[in-house]
Structure formats: structure tokens, C-alpha cells
Amino acid sequence: MAALALAAVLISACESAQPARPAATAIPIPRHPLTLAAAIKGATDLGPATRATTVSLNFGLSTPRPAPALVNSAVAFLVALGFSAQWQAPSSLIAADGPAPVAAALLKVDIESYRLANGTTFYAALDQPTLPPALAAVASGVSGLDNYRRSRGYAIRPGGMTPTDVLAFYNIKPLRDAGIDGRGQTIVLPEIDDLPSLTDLNKFAAKFGLPPFDGVLTAKRDPNWGTPMKPEGETVLDLEIIHAVAPAAQLVVYLSAPDFGHSDRAFDQMVSDHLGSIISESLGSCEPDTPSGARNVYASIQDRATALGMSHFVASGDSGAFTCGFDQPPAGSFPSTLPTVTAVGGTSVFESKEGLYFKEYAWGSPIDQSGGGGGASRFYPIPDYQKNVAQSLGNGQRQVPDVAAAGDPSTGFHIFFKGRDGQAGGTSAATPLWAATIALVNQDLKQKGLREVGFANPALYWMGENSSKLNPKPFHDVTAGNILGYGAGPGWDFATGWGSMDAAALAAAWERYIRSGGG
């Protein structure tokens, strides 16, 4: 992925023991420029990166099952040049760390060092790399030619629903009442900010009558993946939302540094380990600003995940149609724009007096320029499963999002972080909600002797297109509101996709889809 930088997470203090909406005392996290070009424009050029700068490269293999002899030859070539290089099947990449001048000479690029006004330093190569024959024989691209934090986690501001609210609002409670709690399921999460205190997580669990995290949470670290950022709230948001919905599901967090080179390695290992069949990813980057090599390396790993039957849910962004910034043309967030993942947008939710579903709007707030991500990819053509809902504004490209759920921070989720009650939102919240719901659906399907969900989009689009034949309907069709560029309407739209879930109806529809021969 791109250099990974979290969006702001604002945590509100709450002295009351009641899970009421707390008054906000905002603690903003400094934002970085959204694109590499903007960062370089505002930075001081320190000149060519020296040998003291280690560049972490990933060479994406051109075939899923390359000839080991050729790959090992490429590894030996890199080692002879002075890189620390390694590959082990079934990995999709050769990982190579080495001095910046050696990397620059190898790939025929200029790697410069830069310093931002706040003192942050980074390196970047602005030229297109050229692979030497020894690497071109096995690799199709390279990532890691910069370590600027372009990507970010999508969790941005205080919100408000308790776990009890969530179960009722999205009709998850009937599944939980039937004993469906995620048991036997494992959800894996790529993260770039470190785990919060286990005490925090367990206080959240105790507050809402959930089992402790001790028996379900595992953290994976590796020096080869770099050092994650300090806890910023992204990881705690993901974990607490999933635990609220699927408290018996196992959770495995893969922690990496916030840059393409290191995060791709952690993602590759996560797919190789295949500890669970569901991926929840709340990270993303401006698609046009994501180097083609980084996109290709990531896509090849994701192809393996799809082949393994993994369901991958990805946040679509928190800046509406303008993921790259409001001074830039509309653009989507990578990797949510990949046709092989399920992109999750955001809504504003309104409960009934009884705490049940009342209505949702597409989330868009022009005052603070936030909203659920949506739009057309610049690079990926529209997939077959989407062609029946192709929009003219999509220009024949992949359309995002596929589905949505609560994302508006003002109607977001109650969390516990750094010893305090708080509330948060963003498509970072909607994404783990969908991942956890699919864990329940998987458990239900397996109990009925059926296969798991796997790649979700073919089934989701079948349900959307056959909605009139399904009773109850698996989606709440969001038809009002906009995401600062696109408006919601009946059926699929760029604002919320097919809409949010009615979990019990979704499980029933998935059973019908599979029994009717779907997939």
C-alpha cells in the first residue's frame, strides 16, 4: 500500500459511567499533505538519499506460481548487490532492503531525501523505475520507492452508537439470539498504529457485557514489516466494533510501518498465513497518487487472497468523492477501487424511538469536508458483476462503494481508548461492522453445511439486482443525502452502493444464493 498515514481520530471525554453521547473534547492528530507531490512541494529537498537511508523494496512476482529457480536467482542477484533479500513460497513478492544509492542505481531512478516544516523526513523517487533483466524475468513491478505517509486510516471524529444500538439498528440481534456469535471464525486486520492497552479493550468489553479480549486477540509483528505508529485509535475502533458484533470470533492483527514497502510485506504474510477467511482493512490512499508498482504488487497479493476464498472489506475513504483533496479532481481510494475487494462507504444513521432502524442518509458534511468515499477508478475497468448497474459517470471503470454502513462521526460508535469513553466514525467504522457481520453469516452457513462467503461481491450484486424477489430485503436502500460529489438514489449509487445491511435478512439471502447455485 501507499505510505500509510492515519486520518485524525478525535476522542471525547466522558465522566459518566453511562454509555450516553459524551460532550466532545477533541484531541486532533496533525494531518499530513494527502499526496506525495503536495508533500514534496512544501518540503525542503535535502539532496540525494545517502547510504544511511535504507530503502525497503518489494518486487511483485509476475505469475502466481513462478519457477523457484528463477526467483532464487533474482534473490541471489540482489544479495550480490548488497541488498538483504528474501522470498519464500507462496509469497507474491521478493522483499529487499538496501542502501538508497544502490537501489537508485539498480532501478535507474533518483532517490531524494526531503524534510517537511514539522521536521518529518522522508525519501522519494519521482522517476519511473526500470527493472534489470534478472528481475524483469520474474517481477512485474516494484513498490517501496518512497516512504511518505500518503495512505491513512479512515476514522475521523466522535460518534455515538453502543453495541446494543448496533445490534438492534442493523437487525443483528436475531442472529446473536440464535447463538451466532462468530465462533469458529477468524478476522485478520492489517494495521499501522499499534495496539492500545489490553486494559482499554477489556474495559470496553466489560462495560457492554462482552467476553474479554484475552482469549480472542493475537498481534503479529516482524522486524521485516517495520515499526507501527503509536496507538492513534484506528486499531481500537476496528477491534471494538468487531468484538461488539462477533464476540467469539478470533482477531489477528498484523502490525506494520506506515509505508508501501513494509505494509505490503505484512499483507503478503497475512495472506500466506491464511489464519482467517475475512479481512477487515480500514486503510487507503489517493488512487492516482499510488504508484503503479505499489498497486500492482498489492493487487497480486489480493489475487491470492481471492483464490483462497477470503472476503476482503476495505474502507472507501472519508473525503467523499475527493480522496486526493478538495483542490484535486474527484478520485477514489486505493485499494477500495480494486475489483477484487468489497468497498464500504458511509452513512448517517437515525434510530427510531425504540432504538431500531428508522432511516439512513449518505454521509456528507460540507462544513468539515468529510463524507463516505465513492466514485470511479482511474485504472480498473468495470467488473462483470457491476455491469448491470454501470453509471454514465463511471466511464466504464470500477465503481465504488459496493455497500455502506454507519460512518458519519456525529452518529458513529461508542469506543473506549486511552482510559476514556469516546465515540468515533468514518468508513473505518463501517468496514469492521461489515466484516464482523460476514463472520456471523459464515458461521450460519457452515452450520447449515454450506460454503463460506468468500469473495462477497458476486453475491451482493445478485442480491441487489434481485431485491424485489427477496423478502425480507438484505439491504437498506439509502436514497437520500450525498457524499460531496455524488447523491444517493434508488438501487446502486456512488454514494452508498447497495446500502447498508439487515443482517438477519442478509444471512437468509446468502443461504438462498448458495443453494440456488450462486458462485
Image (cartoon, rainbow, N blue to C red):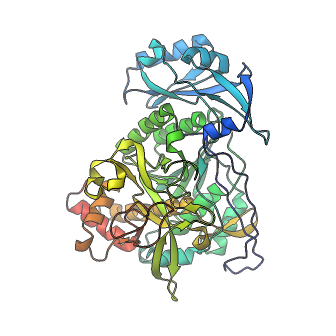
Position of 413 with respect to 29 (left or right) is left
Q: Nearer the viewer, residue 204 or 486?
A: 486
Most distant residue in the left direction: 516
Position of 420 with respect to 505 (left or right) is right
Residue 421 versus residue 52 in the image, above or below: below
The image quadrant that residue 301 belongs to is top left
Can residue 455 be seen in the rendering of this structure? no
Residue 236 versus residue 102 in the image, above or below: below
- Residue under the point 53% across and 55% down: 317
Question: Quadrant location of the N terminus?
Answer: top right
Figure disc tally: 0
Residue 514 image offset from top left, x and y in percent:
25, 60
- Residue under the point 34% across and 73% down: 505
Residue 176 image offset from top left, x and y in percent:
45, 74
Position of 16 with respect to 284 (left or right) is right
Residue 261 image offset from top left, x and y in percent:
58, 33
Q: Nearer the viewer, residue 484 or 23?
A: 484
Most distant residue in the bottom direction: 353
Residue 46 image offset from top left, x and y in percent:
75, 26
Position of 123 with respect to 140 (left or right) is right
